[in-house]
Structure formats: C-alpha cells, structure tokens
Amino acid sequence: MALSRRELFTGQRVASADGIALPWWRGEKGCDGCGTCVSACETHIIRLAAGEVPHLDFLQGECTFCAACVDACPQPLFHARETEPFPQRIRIDNRCITFLGVNCRSCQESCEQQAIRFLLMPNGIAQPETLPQHCTGCGACIAPCPVSATGLHHEP
C-alpha cells in the first residue's frame, strides 16, 4: 500500500476497518473464492486473498450498498437485502487529532448520513461525537482520517 506524506510522517496509517464482511453477508462458510464479487464491486473495495472469504477495504473507498456483489455471487451467502447490511457502526478512538488541539473534521465532512458531529469545547477545538443510530457502516469516514482514528465496531 502506498503511503501519503501525511501517513508516512505520522506513522499512524492502519487498516482500521480491514476484514469487514460484505454487506448482507451471512457469515457462513461456503465461499469458493471465485472472485465474482470483487469484479462486480463498483467502488473496488472488495478484497479476496487466497484461502480467505471476501472482505471490504474501506481505505480504498466506501460501500454504496449497490448490492452488485450480492447479485454476482453464485452461492447463497447473503441475507435478503431488506435486512440491515452491516452490524458495524462508527467509532472514533483516542488517536483523533482534535484531542491534541488540532482542528480537523475530515470524518464529519465525508459522512453523508451525519453520523459524526463536532461539539465546541472550552479550548475552542471541537471534539467528535458519534451518532451510531445514523451510521450505515458505509466506511466513507475511514479513508479521509489523517491518523486512522476512525473505524467500525459491532453494535450490540
């Protein structure tokens, strides 16, 4: 993976959402690794390594929930599209540079669902607050974060 100058100097770039299953994935074995989901993905975020099940790489982009991967798969590995596509929701960890006094809102600016907002604090630097009920798990907020502080976690 090529690093930007910012990623090189901060040393913080990690694949915080690597390994996230495809939307509507049942979590069952049965994937034969054919790769039709990889070629069907319009945002090119599906990765498939030998011997593994396909997963999403949100460092490459976001999921649009187009369901092309579901339609392309020859196996019955997915739930009906009427169900929720992901159980994961946004999380911002303590690496967020706003906690260090740096004004940044890259995650908020990339979130169409407005699942991230910033609250003004007495020091004048707004701090992030996540609204999981608005999050779809699309991953749009992950790649823009300069220090990989954004990621997804399973909602109970």
Image (spheres, helix red, strand yellow):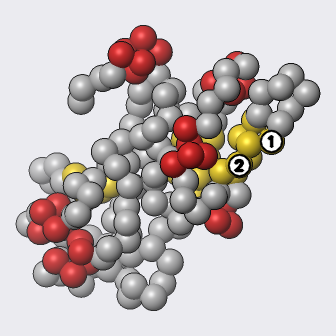
Q: Residue at x 86, y 32 (%)?
A: 121
Question: Could you say which disc has been placed on residue 119 in the image?
Answer: 1
Is 95 placed above or below 136 here? above
Q: Residue at x 63, y 58 (%)?
A: 114
Rendering coords of residue 75 (x, y %): 18, 81
Which quadrant is the C terminus positioned in? bottom right
Callout 1: 10 Å neighbours few (<14), some, many (20+)? few
Find residue 106 and report its image quarter. top right
Please state which amino acid type lies under the numbered disc 1.
Leu
Please state which amino acid type lies under the numbered disc 2.
Arg
Is 148 placed above or below 135 here? above
- Helix, strand, or loop for circle 1? strand
The reply to whether residue 106 is in sight is yes
Find residue 3 and report its image quarter. top left
State the residue position of label 2. Answer: 117
- Does residue 138 appear left or right of residue 104 in this picture? left
- Does residue 118 appear left or right of residue 69 in this picture? right
The outermost residue toward the left is 34
Q: How far is disc 1 from disc 2 in space, using C-alphas?
A: 7 Å
Rendering coords of residue 133 (x, y %): 68, 67
Rendering coords of residue 69 (x, y %): 23, 72
Rendering coords of residue 53 (x, y %): 24, 60
- Helix, strand, or loop for circle 2? strand
Which quadrant is the N terminus positioned in? top left
The outermost residue toward the right is 122
